[in-house]
Amino acid sequence: MNQKPKKSLYRYYMIIIAVILCLNFIVAPLIRSSRIETTAYSDFLDAIEEKQVENVQIENQEVFYTLKEDNKTYETGLMNDPDLVNRLEDAQATFTQVVSDTVNPFVYYLLTLLLPLIVFFWLGRRTFKKIQDKTGNESMSFGQSGFGFGNLGKSNVKVYEGNKTGTTFKDVAGQNEAKESLKEIVDFLNDPQKYKSIGARMPKGALLVGPPGTGKTLLAKAVAGEAGVPFFSISGSEFVEMFVGRGAAKVRDLFKQAREKAPCIVFIDEIDTIGKKRDGAGLTGNDEREQTLNQLLAEMDGFDGSDGVVLLAATNRPETLDPALTRPGRFDRQIPVELPDLTGREAILRLHAKKVKCSPEIDFNMVARASAGASGADLANMVNEAALRAVRDGRKSVVQKDLEEAIEVVIAGEQKKGTTISNKERMIVAYHEIGHALVAAKCQNTAPVHKITIIPRTKGALGYTMQVEQDEQYLISKEDAYHRLMIYTGGRCAEELIFNTITTGASNDIEQATKLARGMITRYGMSENFGMMALETVNNAYLGGDTSLQCSNDTAAKIDDEVISLIKKAHDEAYQILSENKMKLHELAKYLYEKETITGEEFMEILNRPACLPDVKS
Ligand code: ADP
Ligand code: MG
Ligand code: ZN
C-alpha cells in the first residue's frame, strides 16, 4: 500500500508538538517576564516595612511578591535573611516557599535553544521538499550535500502488497488466453522452484496489447490481486517530466525499489508514452523521453528472471514502440487483449449484470450478438445505461428492453424525444430504412434484421436498421462484403425509387460504403485488376485503423475508379431488388411510418405474407 498518508499524518503531529513546545519554552517565559518587574531587595524590605506586601512566594533563590496597591508581580533575589519570616508575619503578608525541581541548565538550554532550531531546520527541509516536488529539479543538487535530501527523483509509484487491489481474475470475463499467460507468470512468482528445477527461465516481461477498453489495466490489476508478491504500478505518463533527466531518475528509482522487494511485479500502463520509437533527428530534441527510454532499456537488461522482477506493460499502440523494447529478452511475451468475441461479450455482460438487479429472463446471448465490435468497457457502460433506463422508467430491475435500448444509446445516441420531424421527412426516413432492410432480406448470408426504427437519435441518425448476426463472423467473403455494400446503398436507392430525389440522410451510409469498398480493393485483394497487391497499410491496428496509401499516383487514380464502379454496381443491384419488390417496399414503409419502431419478426412477417394491395401513396 501507499506509504504516503501515514507519513504526512506523522508529520502533522510533529508540527503540532513543535508548536506546543515552542509556546511553552519561548513564548510563555516571554509573556511571564513582561508582567514581572525586577526590583532591588531593599525595595522589597521597604515594602514590608510599609506593610504594603500582600503575598510572597519564594522559589529557589528568587522572591516573587505582589503589593496591595497594584496587581503587579515583582521579583527580586533572595538574600541570607533569617529574620524575614518574622518581618513578613508582622506585615501580615501571606507567604510560601515553593521548592521546584531545579531544571538542569543543560537540559534547559537544550529545550529552549536547540529544540526550536531543530524544528525550524525541519520545517525548512519540508518546504524545500515541497518546492522540489513541484519543480522536480534534481540538479538543484542540494541532495548531494549531506543534508539527507536523498529521495529526489522518487517515482510516484503505487505499491500494492498482497490482494490489495481487490481485483482478481474472476473480475475479468473472457480474455482466456491472456489470463492463461498471466497466470503462468503469477504461478512462477509464487513457486519459482517448480520452474527452476526444470531449468525454465522466468519471462522478463509481458506486454499487453489491444484496443482501448478491452481490459488491459483490469488484467494487470487482477495479476496484482492474484500474486502473493508486491506489485508496483505506474503509468507511462508519470515518467514524463519537465526537466531533463528526471524521468530517467524515476525509472532508476522504480527498479531499485523493485529489486529490494523482489520477487515482485512492475506494471507500466500506457507504456507507449515513454516507449515511442527513437528517431535519429537529434536536434529536434526529445532528449528527455529518449533518456527515459534508454534508462528503461538498461534497467531491463540489468535484471534477469532469477532476480524475481517481472515487468508487465500495457499499450494500445504497439506499432509505435521502439523495436529495442519489444525484442525478445526485454518483453519476451506479447499478450494480445483483443476485442471480445461473442462468448466473451456474453460473459462480460453477465459479469457486469451481476452488479445490477436484472430480471431473470434477459437473453444475454442476443444482446451480445447485437453488440458486435463493442469492447469490454462499452459493454460495462451498456449495462449501466440499461440500469439507468430502468430507474428512469420506475422499474425495480433491468429488463431485456433496457439492454437493447442501451446498445442503441451506445451506438446511435439517446432518443431525441422533443424533435418534431415533418411527416414528409418521416416518410422519407421510413422508406430509406426499409430500403436497407429489404435489400438485406433479399441478399443471401446477411445478418437478419433485428429492429428498424425511425425515432431520431442525438448522434444525428434519423432512423436506423439494426442487424444482428446469428454467430460471430471472423471471415468475410467477397460476396458478403459486396452484399454489405448493397445494403449500405439500399437506403439511398429507396429514396430514388420512390421520391425521385435524394437527400442528405445517406451520408453515413456513403461513408461506410466507401470505406468498405476501398478496403476490399486496397487491403483485402478483392479486385480483379489489382489482385493480391497491398495498396494500403494500416497505421494503428487498435485505434481507428487509419490507413495510408502505398502506391503511385497513377495507381491511386485507378483505385478511385475501381471504388467508384464497385459502389455503383452495388447500388444498381440494390436498386434492381427494390424495384422488383416495390409493393412490399410501400407496404413495409407504411407500416414502419405508423409504428415508428418495428421488430425483425414483424418485418419478416409482412415481407413473407402474400402481397395485399396497400393504398399506395405515390
Ligand atoms: P484498457 O484495456 O483500456 O486498459 P480497462 O482495463 O481500463 O481497459 O477497462 C475498462 C473497464 O472496462 C474495466 O474497468 C471494466 O469495467 C470493463 N472491462 C473491460 N474488459 C473487461 C473484461 N474482459 N471483463 C470485465 N470487465 C471488463
Ligand atoms: Mg488502460
Ligand atoms: Zn441509411
Image (spheres, grey):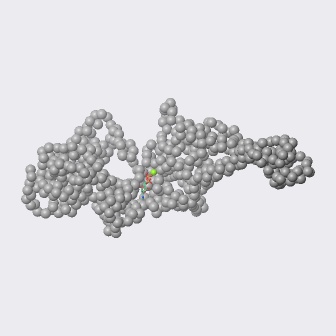
Front residue of 109 and 62: 62
Q: Is residue 245 left or right of residue 442?
A: right
> Which quarter of the frame holds ligand 1?
bottom left
Front residue of 414 and 391: 391
At 35% from the left edge and 54% from the top edge, which residue is drawn?
374
Residue extending farthest front: 50
Q: Is residue 33 left or right of residue 418?
A: right
Q: Residue 481: x and y, percent?
A: 26, 51
- Quadrant of res 383: bottom left
Q: Is residue 377 left or right of residue 28?
A: left
Front residue of 20 and 379: 20
Q: Is residue 157 left or right of residue 520?
A: right
Q: Residue 464: x and y, percent?
A: 24, 52
At 56% from the left edge and 49% from the top edge, which residue is drawn?
157
Residue extending farthest bottom: 360
Q: Residue 422: x and y, percent?
A: 17, 48
Q: Residue 290: x and y, percent?
A: 53, 38
At 59% from the left edge and 40% from the top edge, which residue is drawn?
131
Q: Is residue 263 visible?
A: yes
Q: Is residue 77 visible?
A: no
Residue extending farthest top: 283
At 21% from the left edge and 50% from the top edge, which residue is drawn?
420
Establish if 487 lies above or below 357: above
Q: Quadrant of the N terminus?
A: bottom right
Q: How many marks?
A: 0
